[in-house]
Image (tube, rainbow, N blue to C red):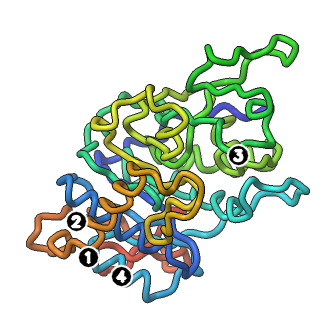
Amino acid sequence: MAPEPCDGKLTAAPKKRGYVTFLAGGGDYVKGVVGLAKGLRRVKSAYPLVVAVLPDVPQEHRLLLLSQGCIVREVEPIYPPENQVQFAMAYYVINYSKMRVFEFEDFSKMVFLDADIQVFSNVDHLFDTPDGRFYAVMDCFCEKSWSYSPQYAIGYCQQCPERVRWPPELGPPPSRYFNSGMFVFEPSRATSRSIIEALRIIPVTPFAEQDFMNIFFEKIYEPLPLDYNLILAMLWRHPDNFNFDEVKIFHYCAAGSKPWRYTGKEVNMDREDVQMLVAEWWKIYNDESLDFTREGGALEAQPVTARPAAVPVAIELTGSIVPAAC
C-alpha cells in the first residue's frame, strides 16, 4: 500500500511559479527542450522553464539551454529497486529520475512538461488551480505499447468506457489513470522523501514512473481536459473526444512522431494531421525571432538562498551557481 501523499508544506513557500522538464544523456532530446522553450515564449508565458538534468547531460547542451533562457538544475538519478520486470520501453527506467522535480521547493507551483511536448496556447492559468491536488490528463490504453495490460487484452479504454465494458470477473474497474508527460504539482521535500520511501514498497511495473505516480497520487488526482496533453494516438483512436482547434498542448509520444526524428514511415505517421503538427513544431524550433534575449521580457528566476558548498549545484538563468534543492 502506498503511503499517503503529502500535499502540504512544513513552511510557507514563496509564490514563485515555473514550467519544468527533464533531460538525460547527450542525445537529441535536447532539441525537444529547445523547441519547448521557444514554444512557451511564442505563447507569451510569464514563467520560466526549468530543466532538471542528469549528470550525464554534456556541458554543450547545458549552455545551449542557458542560451535559450532556461534555468538548468542538475539532479541525481533515481533508480528503481532491482527487478525482473520488462519495461514497455527500455528507456523508461531513466524516467524515474524526473521525479526529482518534486524537490524544487523554492517554487510554489510548477507545470511539468515532457521534452516531446509542444505548447500551442498559453496555459499559465494552470498555476491558478486549487492547491493540494495533483492535476494531469487521463491516458489512452489503445496503443500496442499497452499490450501487456488487461485493458488492452479486452479492448477496454477509459477514453470510451461504454464501448467495451469492464467485465465483473476481472474485479473492480481500474482507477483513473493519467499520462505523466504533463502534470501540475506543488514541489515539496516532504513529498519527495515520501516518493523515495514508496519506491521501496510499490512494485516496479512496465510503465515505470508513470505507473508509480498513478499509485502514489491516486487519492489527490484531478483529471484535466484532453486539451492540456493530447497524445497523438488520440488523433486516430478517439477523434470524437476533442476539438482539434482547441487543443493547447500536443504530446509527440506516438511511435515515430518525435519531430526531430520524424521520417513519416511508421504506422499512422503519414496522416495529414500528424504531418501538419510535425511541421508546426519545426516552424517554432527554426523561428529565430523566438530565441531568448534579455530584452525580450523573459522572466528571470529569483535567487535561491545559498547553502553549504557540499550540496549539488545548479546553474540558474542568470549564469550564477546556486545549490540545488536537496
Amino acid type at circle 3 is Lys
Mark positioned earlier in the residue sequence (3 or 2)? 3
Check residue 218 in the rendering and tell me which mark sits there, or answer none. none
Amino acid type at circle 1 is Thr
Disc 2 residue crowd, few under 14, some 14–19, many 20+, Cα 10 Å: some
Disc 3 residue crowd, few under 14, some 14–19, many 20+, Cα 10 Å: few
Which residue in the protein does label 1 denote?
A: 318
Q: Quadrant of residue 198?
A: top right
Assess whether mark 4 and mark 2 are in contact (beta carbons under 8 angstroms).
no
Which residue in the protein does label 3 denote?
A: 144
Mark positioned earlier in the residue sequence (2 or 4)? 4
Q: Nearer the viewer, mark 3 or mark 1?
A: 3
Mark positioned earlier in the residue sequence (3 or 1)? 3
Amino acid type at circle 4 is Leu
Which residue in the protein does label 2 denote?
A: 300
Relative placement, left or right, of 63 versus 83 is left
Assess whether mark 1 and mark 2 are in contact (beta carbons under 8 angstroms).
yes
Q: Which residue appears farthest toward the right when viewing the image?
A: 84
Which residue in the protein does label 4 denote?
A: 64
Residue 97 position within the rendered picture, expressed as x and y whole percent measured from the top left: 62, 61
